[in-house]
């Protein structure tokens, strides 16, 4: 993983507590200087609360000494860490510059200078690392998010995830005592058996396993064709490599297409609703300001002017 970009959502999750906030074991060892430099970058200016901020903090003096082995392996040595963190900051700069948020661009430019001033990498190396790695990162993120859906069970809100590498399933839910639990199995049938007969069977009604079985078929990556998923990856990658009006409009029209298809009466309505949700989450995790702009523009979209007919056909292809 030394030569791959950081999946910020996955990496930052290693530093969170059960409530989804930065664990105090890391905030306690953070210097005032690092906190005051990182916290204002995005989100709440008085807290470390975005995935990128958490990732940057993870490489600060003190935090390095207490972070997990898994985090160490993901971020790598000093040079690899600066390449990965620099690339993540550069990605944010690219987006913010396109949006026109000059104040935020200035803050992130300062952070990128802070990283390169350590002397491990140059800005040119960071930009090259970003351009070489963004395609693989987008593919990874799409595969993850399009293999995940929310499932409404009788007494729980749950998330059903399919591992795109090995096909294993995970059902994550919160029980009546507000404890977060997970069931995992190598196959869907094994997961359903565990729900009906396993140690946590009392958490579920008989209908819950039927709901999970039905919803599993509507996981976007399971329902959409490979060509559709590849088109999603291509459109997103094109924007993150070169944010401009044309690449932005392609994402906007893709989102609008999923909205339109989710309202067409037919057996695939829910598939496209789930695909829209997956795409929306990818955009939100990338940059909430960008995501909100796309959502608003897509709702007002009347005609497709950037996506070709062939691209539209690919995006709505099902298995």
Image (cartoon, grey):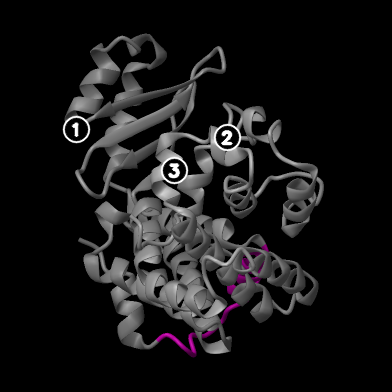
Where does label 2 land, which residue?
A: 16
Residue 72's tag is 3
- Mark 1 or mark 3, which has the lower sequence index? 3
First to last magenta residue range? 289-307
Q: Is residue 293 magenta?
A: yes
Q: CA distance from mark 2 to mark 1?
A: 27 Å
Q: Is residue 63 magenta?
A: no
Q: Quadrant of the C terminus?
A: bottom left
Which residue is pictured at 42% across the width and 51% down the height?
Answer: 76
Which residue is pictured at 24% across the width and 27% down the height?
Answer: 191
Q: Is residue 198 above or below residue 216?
A: above
Q: Viewed as shown, does residue 9 lie left or right of 169?
A: right
Q: Position of residue 268 (x, y in %)?
A: 33, 57
- Mark 2 or mark 1, which has the lower sequence index? 2
Q: 267 or 89: which is nearer to us?
A: 89
Contact (Cβ within 8 Å) of mark 2 with mark 1: no
Q: Position of residue 10 (x, y in %)?
A: 46, 46
Which residue is pictured at 73% across the width and 69% down the height?
Answer: 110
Binning the other alpha carbons within 10 Å of mark 3 as few (below 14), some (14 to 19) or many (20 upward) gives some
Tag 3 secondary structure: helix
Q: 169 or 31: which is nearer to us?
A: 31
Residue 3 occupies quadrant: bottom left
Q: CA distance from mark 2 to mark 3?
A: 15 Å
- Mark 2 or mark 3, which has the lower sequence index? 2
Q: Viewed as shown, does residue 311 lie left or right of 187?
A: right
Q: CA distance from mark 1 to mark 3?
A: 28 Å
Binning the other alpha carbons within 10 Å of mark 2 as few (below 14), some (14 to 19) or many (20 upward) gives some
- Comparing marks 2 and 1, which lies closer to the viewer? 2
Q: Is residue 42 above or below residue 193?
A: below
Where does label 1 land, which residue?
A: 186
Contact (Cβ within 8 Å) of mark 1 with mark 3: no
Tag 1 secondary structure: loop
């Amino acid at each position: 993983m030394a030569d791959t970009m950081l999946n910020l959502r996955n990496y930052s999750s290693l530093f969170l507590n059960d409530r989804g906030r930065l664990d105090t074991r890391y905030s306690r060892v953070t210097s005032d200087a690092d906190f005051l430099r990182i916290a204002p970058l995005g989100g709440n200016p008085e807290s470390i609360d975005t995935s990128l901020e958490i990732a940057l903090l993870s490489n600060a003096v003190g935090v390095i000494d207490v972070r997990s082995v898994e985090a160490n392996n993901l971020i790598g040595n000093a040079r690899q860490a600066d390449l990965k963190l620099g690339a993540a900051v550069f990605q944010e700069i690219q987006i913010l510059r396109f949006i026109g948020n000059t104040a935020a661009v200035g803050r992130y430019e300062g952070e990128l200078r802070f990283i390169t001033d350590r002397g491990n990498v140059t800005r040119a190396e960071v930009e090259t690392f970003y351009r070489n790695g963004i395609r693989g990162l987008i593919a990874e993120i799409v595969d993850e998010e399009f293999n995940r859906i929310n499932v409404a069970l009788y007494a729980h809100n749950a998330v059903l995830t399919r591992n795109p590498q090995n096909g294993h399933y995970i059902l994550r839910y919160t029980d009546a005592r507000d404890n977060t639990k997970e069931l995992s199995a190598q196959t869907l049938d094994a997961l359903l058996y565990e729900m009906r007969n396993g140690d946590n069977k009392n958490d579920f009604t008989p209908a819950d396993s039927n709901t999970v079985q039905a919803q599993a078929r509507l996981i976007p990556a399971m329902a959409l064709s490979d060509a559709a998923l590849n088109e999603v990856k291509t459109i997103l990658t094109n924007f993150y490599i070169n944010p401009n009006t044309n690449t932005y409009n392609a994402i906007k029209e893709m989102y609008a297409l999923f909205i339109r298809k989710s309202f067409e009466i037919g057996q695939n309505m829910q598939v496209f609703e789930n695909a829209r949700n997956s795409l929306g989450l990818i955009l939100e995790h990338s940059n909430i300001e960008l995501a909100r702009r796309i959502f608003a523009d897509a709702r007002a979209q009347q005609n497709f002017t950037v996506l070709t007919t062939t691209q539209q056909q690919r995006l709505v292809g099902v298995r």
